[in-house]
Image: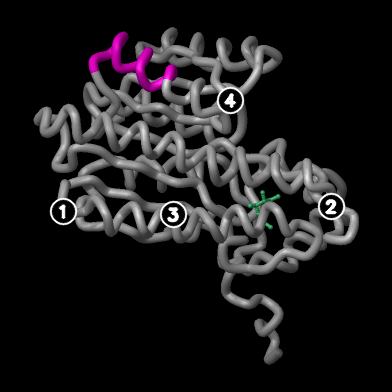
Amino acid sequence: MEKKLDKQVAIITGASSGIGAECAKQFAYSGATVVINYPRASSKDKTDAIVNEITSNGGVAISYQCDVSKEDEVIKMFADVTAQFGTVDILVNNAGLQKDAKLTEMSLDDWNMVISINLTGQFLCAREAIKEFLRRGDNGKSKSIGKIICMSSVHEKIPWAGHANYAASKGGIMMLMKTMAQEFASKKIRVNSIAPGAIETPINHNAWDTKTHLEDLLKLIPQKRVGMPDDIAKAALWLASDDSDYVNGATLFVDGGMTLYPGFEDNG
Ligand code: BGC
């Protein structure tokens, strides 16, 4: 694999499975030193298995436990990674979860949990990353002094009944991302989002785990296939590399056409 991220240090949050794990592998095989963040001790073994896979294939990776919704833990993660590897060049703000319920049945705890991990977590990690990019300045490894990729969703655009907390968090990510991009573009920092559609990961297994569920889901996807983590990781790699140097403040929809109003496919 071409070393498009050679010697750059990347923190990927929520990377013990799914999209984050696949980003970790592709970034490592593209030359990055990868910090695979996981949220709690129970995810340590599967995260370490990803680290082992990467290192046995010649890549450089470590696992790091941190709850991205906790300010002190995020500050410590960035300090520890900077102490160990010298700096951070790339952040993939990927950690996120769903706690679905009809609005009238949604508890404040479930609202707060989704907003604090999906949205506040992205703010806290981006803030620490940007502070480090600005402290370090140009290190000759990339045209930008730092790059942030925010994992959003088609639900930054498509309203989603029964998922108000999740959709609100993703709508928030859209404006957080654009505002950060505007604020720091002149400092040579690039901030972009990826909006995945239905990707085969643990977060949505009940949307594709049976034939009926899968058939229903495919009605929403013009390309008639569920996406794979690899589809998203390739887009993340492009956004992290200098190949996308003039792309800033953009959301890249990687969704098999889900945002193309598939209900109108057959004349509405
Ligand atoms: C959600 C998935 C869902 C997909 C398309 C994603 O952001 O996490 O559960 O399948 O959007 O609706």
Callout 3: few (<14), some (14-19), or many (20+) C-alpha neighbours within 10 Å? many
Image quarter in which the C terminus is found: bottom right
Q: CA distance from mark 3 to mark 4?
A: 20 Å
83 w.r.t. 208: above or below: above
Helix, strand or loop for disc 1: helix
Location of mark 4 (residue):
67
Callout 2: few (<14), some (14-19), or many (20+) C-alpha neighbours within 10 Å? some
Q: Position of residue 110 (x, y in %)?
A: 77, 43
Asked if one can make out residue 2 in the rendered structure from this viewpoint, the answer is no
Q: Which one is in front, 98 or 222?
A: 98
Residue 39 lies in the magenta-colored region? no
Three-letter amino acid code at the position of disc 4: Asp
Bounds of the magenta span?
76-86
Left/right of residue 12 with respect to residue 111 in the rendered view: left
Location of mark 3 (residue):
176
Residue at 33 percent of width and 49 percent of height: 191
Location of mark 1 (residue):
186
Query: Mark 3 and 4 residues: CB-CB less than 8 Å, in contact?
Result: no
Q: Position of residue 184 (x, y in %)?
A: 24, 50
Location of mark 2 (residue):
106
Left/right of residue 21 with respect to residue 205 in the rendered view: left
Three-letter amino acid code at the position of disc 3: Leu
Q: CA distance from mark 1 to mark 2?
A: 41 Å
Residue at 27 percent of width and 55 percent of height: 183
Helix, strand or loop for disc 3: helix
144 w.r.t. 37: above or below: below
Residue at 63 percent of width and 68 percent of height: 158
Q: Quadrant of residue 236?
A: top left
Q: CA distance from mark 4 to mark 2?
A: 23 Å
Residue 84 lies in the magenta-colored region? yes
Q: Which one is in front, 177 or 212?
A: 177
